[in-house]
Amino acid sequence: MAGRSKFGFVSKYAKGATAPSGETQFAFTAGNLNFLSSNYEWLVVNGSSRAQFKGVGTINGSGSYGFIVSAIDADITADISDRDSVRVRIWDRSQADALVYDNGVEQALDGGSVVIHTGNSKK
């Protein structure tokens, strides 16, 4: 099923925390999918231009769904032609991790941006 999606996310480790905190929202209107995270399991920043985080949440206010978001901040990659991009995978934890949504690869954004911060300063 093709269509536009909207998303917003913030993921970070608070000082001394062993798990990240934040919020992820993802809406895919054509699929009647409105995802909202409830907690995060891990966050990895690779270099200063790539980040990936995993957690759980609900779709349309119910259920138990796992998710992984992969994001690229093109402002700090070596290739000036790169554009910020995001991949979102969501699966149903109560149905043997059946895939619910996957945009397949990191897809370039048509609007908005990805900003990855490392340490206390923006790179």
Image (cartoon, helix red, strand yellow):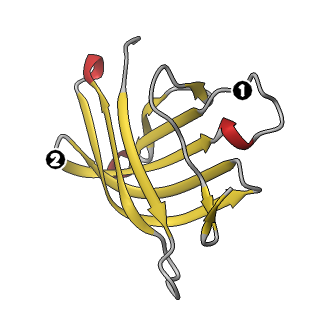
Instruction: Give the quarter of the figure containing the N terminus.
Output: top left
The residue identified by callout 1 is 82
The residue identified by callout 2 is 61
Residue closest to the eye, 27 or 100: 27
Residue 56, how many percent across, how many down? 38, 57
Which SS class for mark 1? loop
Q: Is residue 109 above or below residue 89?
A: above
Residue flagged by tag 1: what amino acid is it? Answer: Asp
Instruction: Give the quarter of the figure containing the C terminus.
Output: bottom right
Name the residue rendered at 83%, 37% in the picture: 78
Name the outermost residue toward the bottom. Answer: 16
Residue closest to the eye, 65 or 85: 85
Residue 61, how many percent across, how many down? 16, 47
Neighbor class of circle 2 (other Cα within 10 Å; few <14, some 14-19, many 20+) is few
Name the outermost residue toward the top. Answer: 2
Which mark is first along the chain, 1 or 2?
Answer: 2
Name the residue rendered at 43%, 39% in the picture: 98
Which SS class for mark 2? loop
Where residue 75 sits, quadrant-wise, is: top right
Residue flagged by tag 2: what amino acid is it? Answer: Gly
Neighbor class of circle 1 (other Cα within 10 Å; few <14, some 14-19, many 20+) is some
Q: Is residue 53 left or right of residue 28?
A: right
Name the residue rendered at 54%, 41% in the picture: 114
Residue 46, how many percent across, how many down? 73, 56
Q: Is residue 108 above or below residue 34?
A: above
